[in-house]
Image (cartoon, rainbow, N blue to C red):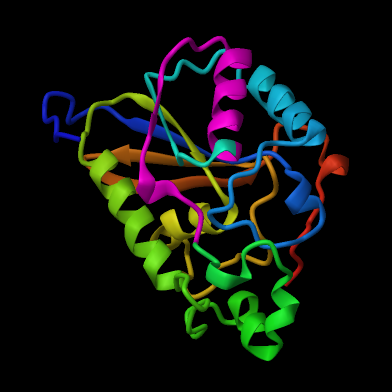
Amino acid sequence: MERNTDHAGKQMKIYIIRHGETDMNARAVMQGWMDEPLNTSGRDLAVITGRAMRGIHFDGCFSSPLVRAKETAEIVLRESGNDIPIVTDDRLREISFGVMEGRKLEEMGEAGLLFFTDPFRFEGFPNGETVRDICRRNQDFLMELSARNDGKTYLIGSHGCALRAMVNSLYPDPSDFWRGHAPYNCSVTIVEVRGGVPQLVEEDKVFYDPDLIVDHYRR
């Protein structure tokens, strides 16, 4: 990405969407870098969300290369009437759960519970990443995109922990990493950028019936 100073007075807008539900979500197991597609419910929520976002013109779209995030972005773009390519970026991948991928976090006992109760003290997953690791790479992406300063609107296909990590420094209290819960499937966090500086304007917005929200990972 290159910095663009021609549009310094214009406001960028970034819509960051967590992917729709997968079967592993429904079983409340850790997916991480495991590559699983959306299930029927996940696709349905993505369709509803995309249709609700008609009227939003996206100039560009970036996504995690993992299929659940990319598939969600594809559906949202199609249903919102935006015919643009998706550029994948490895920095947007979900946190690596290492040996815990495909398993329940409770299997790690008290150490695993820290991932939700005090994630910055959690020492990470065996052969995986820490929360600080995923904050570093996702925030690097956000600041690089923000530095474009181009007044355009972007869609970002993301994941639960990755989304929280990307905007962590924009929260009123960054030490409250999870904000009470993981982002809901197909929820959207909106960031506005002016002068290269990102600012959180809305978090965890759902465009579907709130009765359809399922919190698979309770803190």
| Magenta region, residue range | 68-95
Q: Position of residue 163 (x, y in %)?
A: 51, 52
Residue 145's spot in the image, x, y percent?
A: 28, 39
Question: How far across and down, in percent of the image, does residue 114 sit?
Answer: 61, 83
Residue at 73% x, 29% y: name it: 43
Picture residue at 37% right of the left edge, 46% below the top: 90
Where 158 falls versus 180 (above or below)?
A: above
Image position of 26 (left or right of 151) = right
At horizontal 69% and vertical 44% (from top left) the residue drawn is 185
Residue at image location 27% in from the left, 49% down from the top: 143
Q: Check the image and report above or below for 69 versus 138.
A: above
Quadrant that contains the N terminus: top left
Q: Quadrant of residue 118?
A: bottom right
Residue 205, how many percent across, how many down?
64, 41
Q: Is residue 43 above or below residue 116?
A: above
Instruction: Check the image and report above or below for 115 versus 186.
Output: below
Question: In this view of the protein, can residue 167 be seen by the observer?
Answer: no
Side of 50 where 6 appears, left or right: left
Q: Is residue 130 left or right of residue 211?
A: left
Q: Is residue 33 magenta?
A: no
- For residue 40, say whether it is visible: yes
